[in-house]
Amino acid sequence: MDDKIDIAILYYSKKGQDILDAVNSNNNLSADEIIHYGEEMAAIEYKLTALEVAKES
């Protein structure tokens, strides 16, 4: 079970990094795009937190 959790943690960490890279490389994001990326990051961070808790249990 820990292997699946570790794989999921790596997956969501990569997705989060992809979002950060997309935001940091774009100089002309609209407010709506920034909000969208922020919502996606919030969901990813929530999932990562849940996975970390599950891993410790």
Image (cartoon, helix red, strand yellow):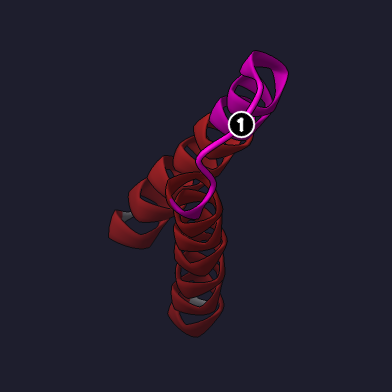
Tell me the residue at 54%/62% (across/down).
18
> Which residue is nearer to you in this view: 22 or 5?
22
Numbered disc 1: secondary structure: loop
Tell me the residue at 54%/44% (across/down).
44
The image quadrant that residue 32 belongs to is: top right
Task: Tell me the residue that label 1 is attached to.
Answer: 29
User: Vertical placement of 30 versus 4: above or below?
Assistant: above
User: Vertical placement of 47 versus 12: above or below?
Assistant: above
Point out the residue furthest to the bottom here.
Answer: 3
Q: Quadrant of the C terminus?
A: bottom left
Point out the residue furthest to the top here.
Answer: 31
Q: Give the main secondary structure of the magenta stretch.
A: helix
Q: Residue 53: horizontal and vertical position, in percent?
A: 35, 47
User: Vertical placement of 47 versus 46: above or below?
Assistant: below
Tell me the residue at 63%/15% (across/down).
31
Tell me the residue at 59%/25% (across/down).
34
Using residue 50 as the reference point, say whether residue 29 is left or right of it: right
> Which residue is nearer to you in this view: 10 or 35?
35
Span of residues in magenta: 25-39
Q: Residue 13: horizontal and vertical position, in percent?
A: 45, 62
Point out the residue furthest to the front here.
Answer: 28
31 is within the stretch colored magenta: yes
Q: Residue 23: horizontal and vertical position, in percent?
A: 51, 45
Classify mark 1: residues with Cα within 10 Å, few (<14), some (14-19) or many (20+). few
Q: Residue 39: horizontal and vertical position, in percent?
A: 61, 26
